[in-house]
Amino acid sequence: QVQLVESGGGLVQAGGSLRLSCAASGSIFSPNAMGWYRQAPGKQRELVATITSDGTTNYANSVKGRFTISRDNAKNTVYLQMNSLKPEDTAVYYCNLRSLPTGFRNYWGQGTQVTVSS
């Protein structure tokens, strides 16, 4: 089994910054992709950013240039640095870990709330 524990959410004013962290523990597999997804009230969960175990990144167009994803493979931890936050970034942010290439093994964290006030 795999456990994902997120931290770093909170309330911030528009234009501010937050850094999310997600630590994975348990039976970690490789290769894998770790990433962040978000879900706003009344909306579907959507991709924010992912990073593979070899460092390949992918971002949603809405966060490119503002958010940066990174990971520490030795600590099995993924980070999301969020700058220039906007009210529309308000959502519950979920950490994800999935096996590559098929995603057969797929795990989610419990989510952390990010609220951006205008």
Image (cartoon, rainbow, N blue to C red):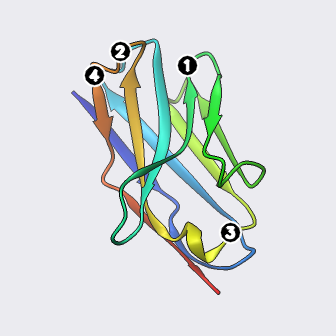
The label on residue 53 is 1
> Three-letter amino acid code at disc 4?
Arg
Q: Nearer the viewer, residue 57 or 17?
A: 57
Quarter of image, res 40? bottom left
**Viewer-side label of 3, 1:** 3
In the picture, the disc for residue 105 is 4
Query: What type is the residue that disc 1 sits on?
Result: Ser
Q: Residues within 10 Å of mark 4 (few under 14, many from 20)?
A: few
Q: Secondary structure at mark 1?
A: loop
Question: Marks 2 and 4: CB-CB under 8 Å?
Answer: no
Residue 45 coordinates in the image, percent (x, y): 38, 53
Screen quadrant of the N terminus: top left
3D distance between C-alphas at marks 2 and 4: 8 Å
Q: Nearer the viewer, residue 7 or 33?
A: 33
Q: Which residue position holds label 3?
A: 85
Q: Secondary structure at mark 3?
A: loop
> How far apart in space, not on screen, are marks 2 and 1 (Cα)?
14 Å
Label 1 CA crowd tier, 10 Å (few <14, some 14–19, many 20+): some
Q: Given contact means CB atoms under 8 Å apart, are the residues at marks 2 and 3 in contact?
A: no
Q: Residues within 10 Å of mark 3 (few under 14, many from 20)?
A: many
Give how far across and how far down residue 41 sits, in percent: 36, 72
Vertical comparison of 8 with 65: above or below? below
Point out which mark residue 82 bears: none
Mark 3 residue type: Leu
- Give the mark nearest the N terminus, 3 or 4: 3
Image position of 104 (left or right of 74) = left
Marks 3 and 4 sit apart, C-alpha to C-alpha, by 32 Å
Which residue has dot 2 on it? Answer: 102
| Circle 2 residues within 10 Å: few <14, some 14–19, many ≥20 | few
